[in-house]
Image (cartoon, rainbow, N blue to C red):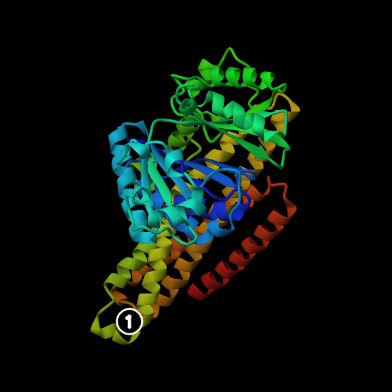
Amino acid sequence: MKSVVECVPNFSEGRDRGIIDQIVNVIQSVPGLCIMDVEMDFDHHRSVVTFVGEIDKVGEGALRAIGKAAELIDLTKHVGAHPRIGATDVVPFVPVKNVTLEECVAIAKQVGEQTYKRFAIPVYLYEAAATRPDRVQLENIRKGQFEGLRVDIEKTPSRRPDFGVSGIHPTAGATVVGARKFLIAYNINLNTSDVRIAKNIAKSIRTSSGGLPHVKAMGVELKARNQAQVSMNLTDFEQTPVHHVFERVKREAEQYGTSIAGSEIVGLIPQRALEMAADFYLQIENFRPELVFENRLAEIVEASKDFSSMPVSQFLESVAAAESVPGGGSVAALAGALAAALGKMVLGFTLNRKKYESHQATLRQHLHVLEDTLSELRLAVDQDSQAYSQVMAALQLPKSNESEKTLREQKLQEALRQATEVPLQVAESAYKTLQALQELRPISNPNLTSDLNVGFWMAMAACQGALENVSINLRSIHDSAFVASKEVRTQEFREMLRRVALASL
């Protein structure tokens, strides 16, 4: 990636994995975007998704996520510990590489404008993108939450959004969009269920109450864990390091006769922040190497070279190199994409020709199919490489003790399942392409028969190649139900391909 922008949208759903998976999928539908982390919190009833991409792509990923969240999340039925005003509550853009904060402000404004135009969701701009001093701080915008804003936005001029009319979306509420520096979401759990203690500590340490600089904090109740939590955002970790915050909360907790049960990172953390805390024992319950932003970014940037956008010569060199990606899965996806592209070319010389006038409706149907499969297969060229990179990353995790071995195996199994799903989808798209090309033979321009036949056999190779990747990955997956279902589908494909091949001889 020549430029890298981080986007960290927060969604008001932390209990239904299926909903968050659908949101993640629409983000991944934008070529070149990489999901780096997904965090779900039951008590907060909130999820944080971290993804990165080039400056001209992250905005579209955020917009697709906002639209999908509006479809799936109903704030009138939402109750959680974390303040919120929207199904997509806040969408910050963060400059990482070869991007300025001002350019992220421009992205935020464009996303804000399009959010209202596309989804009728009003938008407030915050942090560096704020249009008014009182909207720099997120907590000012979220005052009263969804329920309060629903009333205030219509009656109070100062609550009118930057984009949209004086009324919120009935179920998706409003969304806050902005640009900021890297933020660390850091929570400290206390050995007490008394949320009043957490709230008192939060008040004593947050900047707005005269506490530590660059610290936002609130006390929340974790009912599922029977604990109170000091939930924080550290907006400038170099000025107020994580370990300073930890020590301050520890001292405050002792004054109330309690102690720290543990701390956690929500999302990712810069390597520099951990280096600064090297002399302190932070008790981070969920720490693992891939939580370090730079480690995860370097791994993904190296693995995800946006192969689908490479010049042909460069892609061939990448395939020929002694590296694990791109491999057979990406090549199979590319073969399928080439097949769909050939089909579109044939249709271009057939559609709207008087000779084929009686077949126009059918030809257009095939065109829509091939447009969809071309898009899916092109995207899969990168998705397959990304999925296999996750398998390799899991294999490299430490395994010096039982805890590390358990985590490593969990991550490996998750990665293997994803590395199976991607080629299975490639097979699905390639087979649709195959059917369309086969059905085009008698109703398309006969001068292009050879092109159609080349596409047909490319689609056949794509489907067969994808199934090879499915089979090899299933051998290492322990979930017998998952394996059985995918083996059944694989056999179905093989039988369908056999019948199609015989019919073509």
Residue 196 position by quadrant: top right
> Whole-percent x and y of residue 370?
40, 67
- Asked whether residue 396 appears in the rendered view, the answer is no
Compared with 426, 497 (above or below) is below
> Whole-percent x and y of residue 245?
55, 21
Neighbour tally class for label 1: few under 14, some 14-19, many 20 plus, Cα within 10 Å: some
Residue positioned most to the bottom: 358
Locate residue 248 relative to residue 105 in the image: left or right: right
Locate residue 89 relative to residue 280 in the image: left or right: left
**Residue located at (38% from left, 60% from top):** 120
The amino acid pointed to by label 1 is: Gln
**Residue located at (29% from left, 83% from top):** 356
Compared with 431, 299 (above or below) is above
In the image, 446 versus 97, the foreground residue is 97
Q: Which quadrant would the N terminus be assigned to in this image? A: top left
Compared with 30, 446 (above or below) is below
Residue positioned most to the top: 279
> Whole-percent x and y of residue 240?
47, 20
Compared with 177, 256 (above or below) is above
- Asked whether residue 68 appears in the rendered view, the answer is yes
Residue bearing the label numbered 1: 360
State how many labels appear.
1
In the image, 505 versus 271, the foreground residue is 271
Instruction: Classify mark 1: helix, strand or loop.
Output: helix
In the image, 416 versus 227, the foreground residue is 227
> Whole-percent x and y of residue 212?
49, 21
Residue 32 position by quadrant: top left
**Residue located at (60% from left, 64% from top):** 494
